[in-house]
Amino acid sequence: MKQVTVLAPAKLNLTLDVLGLESNGYHSLDMIMQTIDLYEQITLRKSRGLSLRLPNSRVPANDSNTAIKAALAFFHYTGLLAGVDIEIRKTVPVRAGMAGGSADAAGVLVGLNALYEAHLSMSELCALGAKIGADVPFALLGGTARVEGVGDLMKALPPCPDCVFVVCMPAAGISTPKAFARYDQIGSNIHPDGAAAERAIRAEDLQALAKEMKNALEESSESCHNAPIREILDKNGALASLMTGSGAAVFGVFDSMEQAEQAAAQLKQSYPQVYIQKPCKGGARVLHSPKRQTEIYL
Ligand code: ATP
């Protein structure tokens, strides 16, 4: 095999609570994360060197890119004297709180594992990914999961109840470190009950889950877009609306595709990037045949 293509999904935070600040400066969190069917498409070709292209994105293709970090970590760990040419078609908005960078790292790890038939286990891939970013292990696992600690304690949950997400990304993104620094100054009165949200997922109760869907970083968020986006989502029947991660994307959860489409149409009048997405089950995965690719994009 000379080449593989990987699909790596974005995530939304169904809940996000900040529990405290660790002595090492990291925040301990309690989050329920969900992958959605919005994918980065990553093609990896065997090569002697290491190169990265992002043809439709302005994200720098240098050593700070999570894809390069993942490739270096893989070759260092396996000891393989080989290289790879990586091409990433970015679909996930940047600085959105949707973990596009983590999805890219997860996709490169999964793709290299297949390309070089290295047979690394999921736990080995997660250990490599955790060094690149806190969300990378979840990007490998995907589906619905409760993630605690500094992203290191991950519990897979049953799939979240069937629903539709309308995701709206304002023109400007948000820097995650800045969002947490501002939270440290301001704090929050919003603290979702992760255990109650987990119970609602286990009970397949979308209404009960929606009541628990909150984000502790929202009050301290400096984005002026949260309130107007949420207003449109709520007016069109969203069961819940909230920011994902540290922002800037805001999303609503719907039990009706018709209402979701109405909300999306209204948001598109003011915002450039609006997506209607469903929850998806896995994390980054190798695309085995071109036929499957067509099915996914239809
Ligand atoms: P999270 O939800 O994990 O906080 P995010 O959606 O807020 O992630 P990303 O878009 O994943 O943020 O990454 C944001 C920053 O990381 C950008 O400033 C970007 O320059 C840098 N970065 C490095 N590699 C990548 C990559 N492959 N894709 C996107 N951003 C990357």
Image: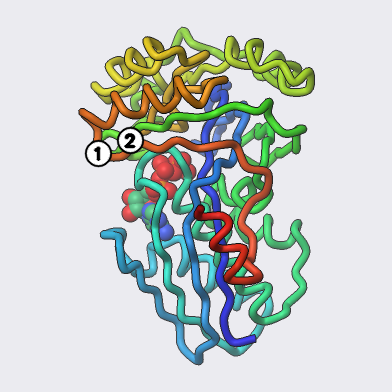
Q: Quadrant of residue 208?
A: top right
Q: Please, what secondary structure does the residue beneath circle 1 have?
A: loop
Vertical order, 213 against 150 (above or below): above
Q: Please, what secondary structure does the residue beneath circle 2 have?
A: strand
Q: Quadrant of residue 96?
A: top left
Q: Is residue 69 left or right of residue 288?
A: left
Residue shown at 33% from the left, 23% from the top: 221
- 50 or 253: which is nearer to us? 253
Locate the N terminus by quadrant. Answer: bottom right
The answer to whether marks 2 and 1 mark residues whose Cβ atoms lie closer than 8 Å is yes
Residue shown at 65% from the left, 34% from the top: 147
Marker disc for residue 169: 2
Residue shown at 71% from the left, 39% from the top: 154
Q: What residue does disc 1 label?
A: 272
Q: Residues within 10 Å of mark 2 (few under 14, many from 20)?
A: many
Badge nearest the viewer, 2 or 1:
1
Residue shown at 72% from the left, 33% from the top: 159
